[in-house]
Image (tube, helix red, strand yellow):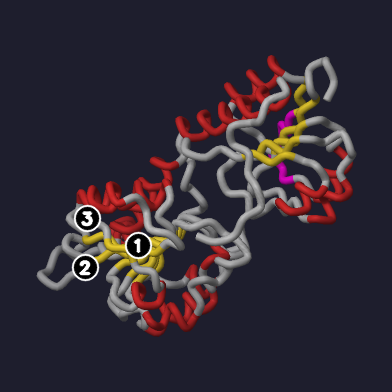
Amino acid sequence: MTTEKPSVLVTRKLPQAIEIRLMELFETRLNPTDEPMSAEALIAAADCDVLVPTVTDKLTAPVLGALPGRVKLIANFGVGVDHIDLAAATARGIVVTNTPGVLTEDTADLTMALLLSAPRRMVEGDRLARSGEWVGWTPTFMMGHRVSGKRLGIVGMGRIGTAVARRARGFSMSIHYHNRRRVHREVEAELEATWWEDLDQMLAHMDFISINCPHTSETRHLLSEKRLRSLQPHAYIVNTARGEIIDEAALARCLAEGALAGAGLDVYEREPEIGESLRRLDNAVLAPHLGSATREGRIAMGERVMINIKTFVDGHAPPDRVFPADGL
């Protein structure tokens, strides 16, 4: 690193307040068009000390290997880092950071919104109300399912999973979870949560499933077709983590066949592509990756990015460094 202001490349358009502050603190190059950068364009532009990518930048081992040697920090704008080959970055001596914590509440809010919308058929009802074809109330019209008193199985009881559990308790749901390790007993007691060591056993007994674990080599297609079909036919599944965790084609088949009651999805296996088999289903509520999409959340993410850069530049360990790891 130089004694001058470090050079920073930002790959996507960020909130204006964050871009202004980045320009003040560092020698910053922005992306005013907000067009995603191809791997070739990113490599060509990355003559910098610090790279600030987002989930849309696929920093594979070949891409990382082709980056100029002066790149020493990847300060990711976002908490998920499955788009970055952490092992390859470590081998290159590049430090990787993310923005944990600041989007927990926003993502948990959206998870609950999907969890409520799917069984109450809110999107389907909205379309009908706008169509002008609604003929009025009847006792059996668009009946859905209540969430109160139902069992919620959380896959990945980290910050976001715990925040989802707290919200679900407010709707009188029974909390169950699967983690590699149990959470603190105090948290279990607060949430009246039941730990299931065996994921398959938990899935078979739940009314709702919320996916809140990271995407790693171990969690890709964690919800396989076999596991999806082990769920009860009245069950709903919500995913605000990463699309790759669920076998999306299998999920579409299960929803179409009535093997599952419904789904609420904010993430997809091949974003931004969403398969026609999902898009045509009335029992799938689909959101365009809105988990952290609040003004407050995105500003907070940018502030974490700047803290990580400034700490690193000052010769200290950045607070949000990410190391290669797998699992829930």
The reply to whether the C-beta atoms of the residues labelled 3 and 2 are less than 8 Å apart is no
Residue 192 marker: 3
Can residue 133 be seen by looking at this rendering? no
Which residue: 89% across, 48% down?
A: 66
Three-letter amino acid code of the residue under disc 2: His
Residue interval drawn in magenta: 30-36
Query: Which picture quadrant has residue 320?
Result: top right
Is 223 or 266 nearer to us in this picture? 223
Q: Position of residue 30 (x, y in %)?
A: 73, 29
- The CA span between labels 3 and 1 is 11 Å
Q: Is residue 167 left or right of residue 100?
A: left
Which residue: 39% across, 69% down?
A: 197
Three-letter amino acid code of the residue under disc 1: Tyr
Kindly identify which residue carries mark 1: 177
The reply to whether the C-beta atoms of the residues labelled 3 and 1 are less than 8 Å apart is no
Q: Per the image, is 173 magenta?
A: no
Kindly identify which residue carries mark 2: 145
The relative height of residue 233 versus residue 93 in the rendered view (above or below) is below
Mark 2 vs mark 1, foreground winner is: 1
Which residue: 42% across, 72% down?
A: 281
Secondary structure character of the magenta stretch overall = loop
Helix, strand or loop under label 3:
loop
Q: Earlier in the sequence, mark 2 or mark 1?
A: 2
Q: Position of residue 291 (x, y in %)?
A: 46, 47
The relative height of residue 296 versus residue 121 in the rendered view (above or below) is above
Mark 3 packing: few (<14 Cα in 10 Å), some, or many (20+)? some
Helix, strand or loop under label 1:
strand
The relative height of residue 232 versus residue 138 in the rendered view (above or below) is below
Q: Position of residue 200 (x, y in %)?
A: 40, 77
